[in-house]
C-alpha cells in the first residue's frame, strides 16, 4: 500500500523511508491517527479515517522495532527506553501539520500512536464548524458574556478542542486587543493568535489546576482550560467563572445533561454550578455518506430510528470502499440561565430529569439532530447507531 511494497527491507534506510511514507500517507488521506500495533505476526499499521480504524499494512515483526525507533527519533524520544510510556512531537518543516507521538510497552513490543493535528487553516471560526443555526446564534451570544463557564463536551475524538479554539478565535477577533485571553492546556494543539497559551509541565508541578490558579493573577478576562479531568481542576475552573471571568473548557460526557450530572458527581457544589455554569455544548461527529450511497426502502435499515428516509452506504473508489467521505457536526446546546434547570441543579436532579427539563427549555437533542441528518440523506441510520449507540 502507498508504495511500501517497493521499499527494500534490506536497505539500511528502510525504517527511515517507511516512516516518512506512512506519515505522508496519513497527512494526505486526512487521517486523525496512525496506529502501529506490534503482534506476533508483525507490526500492524492502521489509520483512523473519519473516526474509524482502517487496516493499511503489516510489516515484518523483525523490522517493527526499527520502525518504532525511527519514529521515536523523529519525535525526539529516548530510543533506549522501551519499557516505559513516552510522548513527543513531530513538526515537519514547511508544513502546518504537527503530529503527537505516544509510545507504550506491550507484550510483543512497543506500540505507537501518532495523532495528526489539523492544519491551522481548518475550522478557524464558528461559521466553519457546521453548527446548527440555532446553536450557532446562541453560542455566539454567549461568547459576549463577561463571566461564567461554557463547557464543550462529548466523547474522545468528537472535536471538542476544535470547537473551543474556534470560540477563542471568535472572541479574539471580535474584541481585538480589548480583552486579555489566556489558556492552560495539556498539550497545546494549535497556536491561536491573540491568546497567551501555556502548557502544563508535570516535572515542575505545573498542572491544569495549579496553572489555572496562577493564571488568575495574570489579570485575564477570558480563560481557556484545555480539559476538566479531576475535581481540583473543576473546582478552580468554576471558581474562576464566579469571579468575573469568561471561562471555556472541554469535558468528557455523553450529553449536555450528563455533563451537568457528572460535574455534580465530581463534588462541585450545586450552588456554585448553578451560578457559574452558563451553558453546555455537547457534540458528535457523524460520517457523511459518499455520492455512491443508495436509497433503501428496507425498514431494517432504519434500525429503529424515527426517520422517513434512509440511504445505505455502498462504497466506491472515491471513498476507499467505506461508503463515507468526511464528517459533519451535530450538537445540542443547553443554557442554564433563565430556565428551570438551575433549580434542578440545586436539587441535584439526575441526568434523565435534567435532560427532560433541557428539552422543555428548547434544547434540540443530539438524537433529533441525527435523525434530521438521516432524513436529509447526509448520513445513514447505521452510522447514527455506531456513534450514538442503541440505548435510546
Image (cartoon, helix red, strand yellow):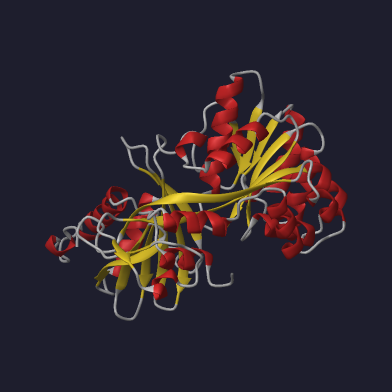
Number of marks in picture: 0
Identify the image quadrant of residue 47.
Answer: bottom left
Residue at 73% x, 50% y is: 233
Towards the viewer: 250 or 384: 384
Towards the viewer: 240 or 158: 158
Most extreme residue toward the bottom, as rendered?
40
Q: Is residue 160 left or right of residue 386?
A: right
- Residue 195, above or below 92: above
Q: Is residue 84 left or right of residue 225?
A: left
Q: Position of residue 337 (x, y in %)?
A: 77, 41
Q: Quadrant of the N terminus?
A: bottom left
Residue at 74% x, 50% y is: 234
- Residue 232, above or below 60: above
Q: Is residue 29 left or right of residue 170?
A: left
Q: Position of residue 48 (x, y in %)?
A: 38, 60
Identify the image quadrant of residue 378.
Answer: bottom left
Q: Position of residue 221 (x, y in %)?
A: 71, 28
Q: Is residue 128 left or right of residue 17?
A: right
- Residue 217, above or below 91: above
Question: Is residue 205 visible to us here?
Answer: no
Residue at 63% x, 58% y is: 255
Towards the viewer: 84 or 232: 232
Amino acid at each position: 500500500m502507498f508504495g511500501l511494497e517497493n521499499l527494500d527491507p534490506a536497505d539500511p534506510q528502510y525504517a527511515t523511508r517507511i516512516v516518512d511514507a506512512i506519515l505522508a500517507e496519513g497527512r494526505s488521506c486526512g487521517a486523525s491517527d496512525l496506529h502501529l500495533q506490534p503482534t506476533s505476526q508483525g507490526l500492524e499499521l492502521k489509520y483512523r479515517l473519519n473516526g474509524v480504524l482502517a487496516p493499511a499494512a503489516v510489516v515484518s515483526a523483525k523490522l517493527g522495532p526499527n520502525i518504532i525507533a525511527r519514529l521515536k527519533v523523529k519525535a525526539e524520544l529516548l530510543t533506549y527506553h522501551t519499557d516505559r510510556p513516552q510522548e513527543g512531537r513531530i513538526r515537519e518543516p514547511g508544513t502546518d501539520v504537527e503530529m503527537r507521538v505516544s509510545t507504550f510497552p506491550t507484550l510483543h513490543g512497543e506500540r505507537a500512536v501518532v495523532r495528526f493535528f489539523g492544519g491551522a487553516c481548518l475550522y478557524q471560526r464558528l461559521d466553519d464548524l457546521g453548527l446548527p443555526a440555532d446553536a450557532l446564534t446562541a453560542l455566539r451570544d454567549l461568547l459576549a458574556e463577561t463571566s461564567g463557564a461554557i463547557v464543550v463536551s462529548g466523547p474522545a475524538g468528537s472535536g471538542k478542542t476544535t470547537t473551543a479554539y474556534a470560540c477563542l478565535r471568535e472572541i479574539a477577533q471580535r474584541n481585538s486587543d480589548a480583552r486579555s485571553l489566556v489558556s492552560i492546556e495539556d498539550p497545546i494543539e494549535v497556536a491561536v493568535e491573540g491568546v497567551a497559551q501555556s502548557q502544563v509541565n508535570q516535572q515542575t508541578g505545573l498542572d491544569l489546576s495549579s496553572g489555572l490558579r496562577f493564571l488568575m493573577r495574570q489579570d485575564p478576562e477570558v480563560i481557556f482550560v484545555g480539559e476538566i479531568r479531576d475535581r481540583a481542576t473543576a473546582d478552580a475552573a468554576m471558581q474562576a467563572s464566579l469571579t468575573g471571568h469568561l471561562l471555556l473548557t472541554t469535558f468528557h460526557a455523553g450529553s449536555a445533561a450528563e455533563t451537568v450530572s457528572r460535574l455534580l458527581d465530581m463534588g462541585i457544589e450545586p450552588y456554585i454550578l448553578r451560578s457559574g455554569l452558563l451553558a453546555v455544548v455537547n457534540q458528535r461527529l457523524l460520517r457523511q455518506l459518499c455520492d455512491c450511497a443508495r436509497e433503501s426502502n428496507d425498514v431494517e435499515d432504519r434500525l429503529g430510528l424515527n426517520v422517513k428516509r434512509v440511504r445505505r452506504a455502498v462504497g466506491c473508489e472515491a471513498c476507499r470502499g467505506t461508503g463515507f467521505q468526511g464528517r459533519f457536526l451535530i450538537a445540542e446546546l443547553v443554557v442554564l440561565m433563565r430556565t428551570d434547570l438551575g433549580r434542578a441543579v440545586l436539587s441535584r436532579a439526575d441526568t434523565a430529569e435534567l435532560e427532560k427539563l433541557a428539552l422543555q427549555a428548547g434544547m434540540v437533542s443530539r438524537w433529533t439532530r441525527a435523525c434530521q441528518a438521516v432524513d436529509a440523506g447526509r448520513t445513514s441510520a447505521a452510522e447514527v447507531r455506531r456513534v450514538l449507540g442503541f440505548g435510546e
